[in-house]
Image (spheres, rainbow, N blue to C red):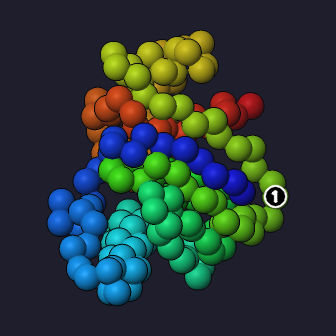
Amino acid sequence: MGIFSFLKNAGAKLFSKEEEAAPKTPETTKESAAEMLARQKAALLKSAVEGLGLKAKGLQVELQGDTAIVSGEVSSQAEREKIILALGNITGIAAVDDRLVVNAPEPEPEAQFYEVKKGDSLSKIAKKFYGNAMKYPVIFEANKPMLKDPDLIYPGQVLRIPPLEG
């Protein structure tokens, strides 16, 4: 649990320009309009997570400014990390406040998070973390369903780098 930082302007574009803009209403209704917009964006964020097939019992997503607050119960550390990354890799989200509870029979090691730099590839990242560029499929598999193709990563994207097994 904790707060994870992301590049606010990198990632999938989930919100339209109109949703990004501040509500243009009289001062008396500005706060309620802003709250309504935040609820709508939070619902879109939750739908994005569920649309990837990521599962959390009682999944809740709230939005406070550019921070997504996520709670619920997940069955594994990997599922927790994928939900955090799915939310954080959306344009407009600068941080994810993780309040997810992992309900796994055995504790799992946490993966490292890595921010993709210009010129990176999964094989280059695998070489850096594992000492072997041919281990890139481990990183690709660890980031499914967010990654659909090992060649389609972008600067600012945050990836899971799981520890190698045995």
Q: Position of residue 67 (x, y in %)?
A: 50, 59
* Secondary structure state at the residue bearing disc 1: loop
The residue nearer to you, when weighing 37 against 126, is 37
Q: Write down the residue under mark 1.
A: 106
Where residue 75 sits, quadrant-wise, is bottom right
> Dot 1 surroundings within 10 Å: few (below 14), some, or many (20 or more)?
few
Question: Does residue 86 lie above or below 18 as drawn?
Answer: above
Residue 23 spot, x, y in % from top left: 26, 73
Q: Horizontal placement of 24 versus 165: left or right?
A: left
- Specify whether 126 is left or right of 104: left
Q: Quadrant of the C terminus?
A: top right
Residue 81 showing in the rendered view = yes
Count of labels in the image: 1
Q: What residue appears at the point 33 percent right and 50 percent down from the top-left corner?
A: 91
Residue type for callout 1:
Glu
| Image-based side of 121 in relation to 19, left or right | right
Viewer-closest of 85 and 97: 97
Pick whichever, 112 or 42, lies toward us.
Answer: 42
Name the residue located 56 percent from the left edge and 66 percent from the top edge: 69
Which residue is at a point 55% across and 56% down the rendered structure image? 96
Q: Is 125 located above or below residue 146 in the figure?
A: above
